[in-house]
Amino acid sequence: MSSAAIPRDPLALELCALSKTFTLGGGMLHKSRSLQAVKDVSLRVPHGQVMGLVGESGCGKSTLAKMLLGLTKPSGGDVLINGKAIVNANQKALARHIQPIFQDPYSSLNPRQRIAQIVGLPLRIHAIGTAKEQAVKVEEMLDMVGLPKRAAQQYPGQMSGGQRQRVAIARALIMRPDLVICDEPTSALDVSVQAQILNLLLDLKDEFGLTYLFISHDLAVVEHLADRLAVMYLGRIVEEGTREQIFTAPRHPYTQALLASALTPEPGLGVPDIGLGAGQPDPSRPPSGCAFHPRCPMAQPECAQQAPALSALDQNNQGRVACHFA
Amino acid sequence: MSNLSSAERSTAPASPLLSVKQLRVDLPVAKGTLHAVRGIDFHVERGEMLCLVGESGCGKSMTSLALMGLLPRKAQINADCLNFDGVDLLTVSERERSNLRGSRMAMIFQEPMTALNPAYTLGNQLCEALRRHQRVSRKAAHDRAVYLLERVGISAATERMRQYPHQLSGGLRQRVMIAMALMCEPDLIIADEPTTALDVTIQAQILHLLRDLQQEFGTAIIFITHDLGVVARIADRVAVMYAGEVIETASAQALFHAPSHPYTQGLLRCIPTPGKTLPGSRLQAIPGVVPSLIDKVEGCAFCNRCDQADQRCHTTPPLQTVAGGHLSRCHFAHQLANPATINAQEVTL
Amino acid sequence: MANILSPQVAVEQPLVTTWQSRLLRSTLNNRSLAIGLLIITSLGIVALLAPWLAPHDPYLQNTANRMVPPIWHETGSWTHPLGTDRLGRDYLSRLIYGTRISLFIGIVVALISGLIGTTLGVLAGYFGGRVDAVVSYLLTTRLAMPVVLVALAMASLIGGSMLTVTLLLGLLLWDRFAVVARSATQQLRDAEYVQAARALGCPLHYILLREVLPNIAGALIVVATLEVANAILLEATLSFLGMGVQPPSPSWGLMIAEGKAYMFFQPWVITIPGSALFVLVLAINLLGDGLRDLSAPGGRNE
């Protein structure tokens, strides 16, 4: 679809100061509150790279994914895909460039449709080819994700979690998008199946020259897949850099805590004491200044007053960190 | 009852706290009978952390529910021995069982929100947990609850006692669950995936806390999880389950350094490990899927996914002792346990 | 190796059984569903074959043969197995033709109200916000109206007939459909397959008709059976009160109304149509119960 003859923008995805504010409540009896799910996020993802996005639940990573997919309208800022703004783009045109793979293979497939219908849906909606050509394409795609031919006639309920996730991948890739948003694609799977799916994602990336935005809370998986990494905390990116930078020399205290709490299968090391307080932040009542300061072991009085900017570590923009003491 | 068990405790200090032999759990389902647990053996020593590890559907949760007596009524439990500190859990009356539950055995669930009653304050539920089993004053129960809440890292414990579960974050709720499990100072806590629903930083904190408290109170814990990283960091001993069987039992050190069952080896190979797996390289996945436990499984349950399987695997392998306290249910256990053989294989591959 | 691979084959086994055979098996396992279905099917056949099954013309009056008692009376005869009414019309024939009226009204009312309620409910559930507020307002307004009184008033204004009763009840009984469709759609709105369809640029009608509707259909069918029973009873009520189906149509409610003067001396003029009504409504409710068990998540293993 996107042939090599057309010169492409070097960036597959660019986010410029993207923000999203939700209004909560606001019924007859309640005062409405606003929740800033995503605040001023800027990110650049070149073609063919895997950008890892990590953070705790409620940090805004899923809202970010929904905005990229055109499912939620941003409150501010721009999303550029291949250099074109998508905020008011036609959903169909957008769908050809960007597709999602969701976390839960049990809810991502319509239980009332056969696999052939599910995987062929993008072709039907976008009227690509005749019914016969579509059927051939579906068969090819199923083969590519490692499913047998007879899978086409099955219903999702007859498949295992790993097989369903393969179907979801087939549906996302059948129109050959440039960019795939993987929202925790393996966290609902068993470890032995997780490895199969990760291998498949890597194979397909090479085969189709895909760009991934890979959202996960599993740092070992992100380290395995991602070329670059962005760490989110309460709606903001607090650190961004190459895999080597983040994993060998994390600068932000939150990134350091995240890395410390990743438990590798090495017996005898015990559970680290990561030194964060017991409190978890409430996204609708974010702390003043640096949002991380109530839990930060290095916090100083100024952290409660002034929010640090996400600033580049060097001229080449190889890494950015938002901390007064980085 | 408590007299009897304390007498038992003093007469047989060397016997394990819990011993399970040939435990089987069958569940009638629409298509037949699900053999969820197919004859497992394990024991728990006093004050030790035993991790039951396995993938979904391997029977680890069914095992824990069978121990607590919380299985659905239509489930059938059989065992040669199901002995908790001298009490036979197979023949115990429902009344004694519920006395045991909460006072000497406690459970921590994956989702604390479903285990805490949303209609009562935390203080209410914590004190109730104690006063149901022990004759203590309201004041004493309250003081113990406040002490334990502080001990599990909850600040302003006295104020928290008046709050309802929905007012807490997930991490705090799990801390409250731990405090509640400790109210009666049980001998055994069964923790079923207690940190799976939590964020990684919170998980690390909760695990750290659990390990601390376990050493302080000398409680034995059966920790059920699918996460090998968690197992490696907290377990004293590990039992690996696959398709309703315990296929390998060993100390944490032995299991991770010399795994002796192809399934355990496969699991360890297929998770990306920083420093061992090259980023972006293909992982060594285990092919195929877990067999259905609805029909009778013939021979070794893993053999259709195993790269070592041969004719011998048609027959059910016995539990073989690889080293002291290290058991593996594989015909090739001794070969697999010997690192020289593994290296030789890698070279030929 | 074949032996060892058998567990693997067992996993694939369910693929061979079709949904039809599974449906058949679960229907037979569910007693109330089977009984309800059996009664309704037989009554449906009776309604369809009424001209061939009825021994007499249900409208043919014979004043010489008035109030003949049914067969279990000493004076009963096989010419009129269930006797005749005050105008000498054959009671069995009227009962058989009455099945048509009850089933027609029940089914058509459920279709009309189902269409209205489902549309409103799905839109409210999917869009939320202002659409939901409007639908909720309509719903509370509708719930504040007493169905029988409004139907009576309207029927007396327009004039009662089978058409009026059907339309009136169809426009009044959509509330349960709307409530169920709304809450079921709300749960599905954030389902990942609906999100995936939206991300593909699927048109709205595709998402609502193909992704949402098939997955809430189970719950709606249960509501529909209950509304069929409800509509049949309301039709009988309105006809009994003289504002429904008009004479000489053999509506069961009308038959009871016409017999009420004789209730103390010839009680069968009331008990026969009354029992018919009871059996039909019971059968529909059994069917609804059975369907609910079938669609309930925990019910499948029982």
Image (cartoon, helix red, strand yellow):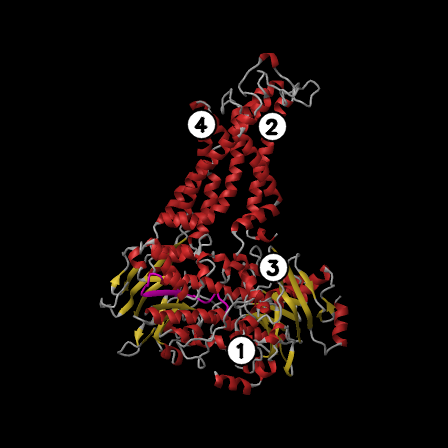
| Dot 4: chain letter | C
Q: Nearer the viewer, mark 1 or mark 4?
A: 1
Dot 2 alpha-carbon crowd within 10 angstroms: few under 14, some 14 to 19, many 20 or more:
some
| Res A315 → quadrant | bottom left
Asked whether, in this view, residue A134 is left or right of residue A274, the answer is left
The kind of residue tagged 4 is Leu
| Dot 1: chain letter | B
In the depicted view, which residue is nearer to us: C33 or C158? C33
Q: Are marks 4 and 2 in contact (CB under 8 Å)?
A: no
In the depicted view, which residue is nearer to us: A17 or C76? C76
Where is residue A66 drawn, in percent x and y?
36, 60
In the depicted view, which residue is nearer to us: C133 or B77? B77
* Label 2: which secondary element: helix
Residue B124 badge: 3
| Dot 2: chain letter | C
Q: Nearer the viewer, mark 2 or mark 1?
A: 1
The kind of residue tagged 1 is Gln
Vertical order, B180 against B248 (above or below): above
| Res A96 → quadrant | bottom left
Report the residue marked by disc 4: C163
Residue B265 badge: 1
Where is residue B41 drawn, in percent x and y?
66, 72
Asked whether, in this view, residue A156 is left or right of residue A48, the answer is right
| Disc 4/disc 2 C-alpha distance (Å) | 23 Å
Predominant secondary structure, magenta span: loop
Return the residue found at the far front.
C2
Report the residue marked by disc 2: C274
Identity of the residue drawn at 77% across and 69% down: B4
Asked whether, in this view, residue A8 is left or right of residue A144, the answer is left
First reached walking from the N terminus: tag 3 or tag 1: 3
Vertical order, C86 against A276 (above or below): above
The mark total stands at: 4
